[in-house]
């Protein structure tokens, strides 16, 4: 594998908890969907080294996806 390929794969692997956390935040009001996506984000965050970085990404994505104000 070339260095560019490794970089792209690592970037995608690091962004997975962020994306899953954001989707969990957008699922606000649907507890089963929110719980499943958040659990997947935290599980994917466990696989990223250094350890707490994946959970920080998942939390940042979740907080970025939570809707502020009323939904219409």
Image (tube, helix red, strand yellow):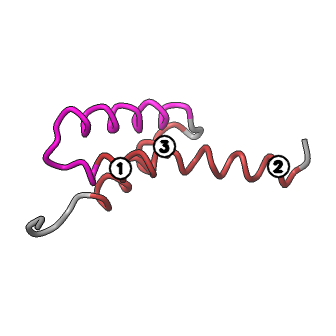
Left or right for 36, reference 46: left
Image quadrant for the N terminus? top right
Q: 35 left or right of 5?
A: left
Q: Which of label 2 and label 3 is nearer to you?
A: 2
Q: Is residue 34 magenta?
A: yes
Residue topped by disc 2: 5
Say which residue label 3 marks.
54
Main SS, magenta region, reads helix
Magenta stretch in the rendered image? 25-47
State the CA–CA distance, disc 3 to disc 1: 16 Å
Residue 23's tag is 1
Residues packed near mark 3 inside 10 Å, few (<14), some (14 to 19) or many (20 plus): many
| Image position, residue 30 (x, y; %) | 17, 41
Quarter holding the C terminus is bottom left
Give the image location of residue 69, x and y in percent: 10, 69
How packed is label 1: few (under 14 Cα within 10 Å), some, or many (20 or more)? many
């Amino acid at each position: 594998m070339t260095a560019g390929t490794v970089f792209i794969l690592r970037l995608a692997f690091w962004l997975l908890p962020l994306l899953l956390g954001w989707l969990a935040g957008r699922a606000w009001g649907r507890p089963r969907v929110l719980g499943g996506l958040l659990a997947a984000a935290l599980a994917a965050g466990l696989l990223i080294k250094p350890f707490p970085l994946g959970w920080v990404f998942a939390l940042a994505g979740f907080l970025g996806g939570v809707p502020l104000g009323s939904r219409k």
